[in-house]
Image: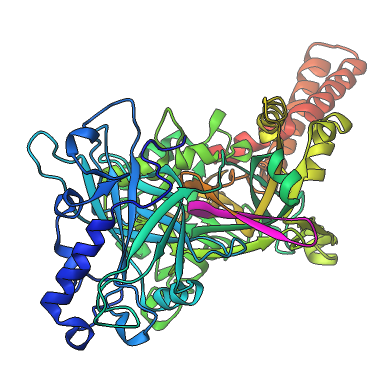
Amino acid sequence: MKKILKVHFQRILSLFVLCMLCVAMLLGGHLTAPVAYADTAVGDVQMDSSNVMDDLQNSTIDGVKFNISNYAFNKNYETQVFMLGEYCYSFYSNLRDNYGLYVYVWNPQALKFKTNSTLNTISLRAGANDGTGHTKYMLLYLNQCEVPNYEGLFLKFKVMLSGEQKEQVFDRLASDKRVYDVSEIELVLDGNSTAESYFVDTTYTYEGYAKGYGMDINAESTLVYHDEQGETLSLDVHSTYFYPDGTHSDGVTRDVLQSVYFSVPNKYIEAYGEMSAVHATWLDARTAPMLVTGNRDIYDTIYPFLGEYVDGGTKEEYEKYAFPYSIIATRAVEGMRDDDELAPYTGYYAYNPFFGTYAGDTDLIDGNTDQGGIAGGYETLVTTLTILFLADGLNAGTHVIAAEDLLGNDETAGWFETYTDEHGGELVNDRYSKDLFSEVASEFEDIIIESDDTYELTDNIVDDSAWNRLFGSTVQSENFISVSAIQAVTSADVEKYGKSEFCDKFFIDESDYTDLCDYITAAESKDDPETVYLFRYKQSEYISVQATEYARSTEWYLVGGTMGCYDYIDLNAYFAQMWVQLGFDILDVTFSNGVTSKTLGVVMSPIDIAPDGKPPASWQEESAAWWAYVILILGEVLILWLLQILLHKLCGLPTWVTIILVAVTVVLDIFFIQTWALSLTKLL
């Protein structure tokens, strides 16, 4: 929406003339300029301390003196940038210490903003070159209007520029006409943890210099300013993802292609050419190990311990550590139920395993992690579990961790938000508890991805059966998929392919198929038709591995259990870890016709993105122990022998009756012996 305060010529001239005169008089020109302040901190700069209303009350707009009553509260108008102020620009490098940009925000709905949030930002491009992208800068809140009956109507922010960012701005600005193209600001409302985008779409141009900052330091101020409507895209961005069918050679790691889709008006494509690049920013974070269990008793027991340190202790310390379960993901799933004594003591993940000694004081686990290793052979020792899900239908092998389960949606909060509300702690991106992540990038990714960039996805078919592990290769085939970063998609593409083929060709998950098709139809049906683009912005890795659930014990089991420390329960669980992108934001997009390029700023509210978490690609169903089959068969032979004696010797029935009994037993074994053996295994 075009903002109501748009002007096309001089605006608020007297404000900056007055400010520059005051600075010149108080500081004596460039010879007594204040000491430069730290890159992102407020220093001894006059504009940092002046009140927003002091700045505005001496200004004129379209030749009319500013009057606050002309901008009273009005629910029909949205929050908007009243103006972008340039302070103390000079083409002399030794006079640039006090240079700054200030944002004046008109707040007609009297919204309450979280003024100390690091998510309050502005997206702008310095310089007139429309081939240059926009940069996202943090806003530092300075003050607000305190005039009675108008409290909070206007707010003042400072654009936080590091020393490096200032130099970049100076390099892009022409000294005679300094152009700032602003696409949007993002502000966080009180009570919210995400920023809301507000349309700006304005190009601000400054000419001349304040007194003491031009070529002639004694000359009066010649600073003038005007603004005009810019050219900015407003994007409705949705996320999707794609997993190849196969995994890496380890059988538990899968590539995941993370994408978004949005539509742009065809008029821009017709004027400037196809989309050739997208400039985006986000914060990468890897989730802490997530546990999915289909065992309700185990889920109910673990839940109260979420966020708490759980120490497995040694076998001898079991009574002191009353937490009764261990969940362990081993490398060899088939070895979990067999006679592999080391199975529960080595693997990918372990939650609450025994430390120290086990089974007759045989020392296989070094519980002293200070020595540089993790207890036992576990790659990841989970001492504090923060993400837990109970599987749908109590079957972990089919449970998908939906992105909405983690991030929430418009109706419900996700796990990240609810856990943070309950447990608190240091926040990541000013929003989620740091305990939810095992790794967080040190800074935001800020990248321009071009249409000819590609990704290479690994799609190995792995069979990790015991036979292949012993006598062959677990990797049955090696495949690689090449994917372009930017691709247009139309309704003709939807009509050309079936659902499965379409998803494979355009690299989206089938769960997003209907939403994408509806989005394409809506975009092409607008009065001003739009084209939908898929933007693949990141390739990451997802780990998902089946886990065994044990009851901890100090008893010695002759059958069942493992080496006197773990009593096997089931295979109904898995651990997973994925990469998510927090605060994903598109800053600008570039169109190209092969000869010239045009970059347009973008307005969108930042979003958090995660793929759905899939269950392990290789899933072992519950299996019975060999001794259970032996017990059943021997028992059946014994029963048939006794029946044969009873029926033939005592009752005088013919032999063919015994033959029928044997045949019935064999048929029943074919259909039920595995179930019986599994039940016997669990019982013993």
User: What coloring was used for the rendering?
Assistant: rainbow
In the image, taking residue 7 as reference, residue 171 lies left or right, namely: right
Please say if 495 is above or below 349. above
Q: Residue at x 51, y 52 (%)?
A: 585
Report if residue 69 is visible in the image: yes
- Depth check: 409 or 280 in front? 280
Query: Which residues, given as a range, are shown in magenta?
Result: 580-599
Q: Residue 18: x and y, percent?
A: 19, 63
Q: Residue 411: x and y, percent?
A: 42, 27
In the image, taking residue 661 as reference, residue 530 lies left or right, namely: left
Q: Is residue 507 on the magenta stretch?
A: no
Q: Residue at x 77, y 33 (%)?
A: 637
Please say if 431 is above or below 379. above
Q: Is residue 584 on the magenta stretch?
A: yes
- Depth check: 130 or 306 in front? 130
- Depth check: 303 or 60 in front? 60
Report if residue 564 is visible in the image: no
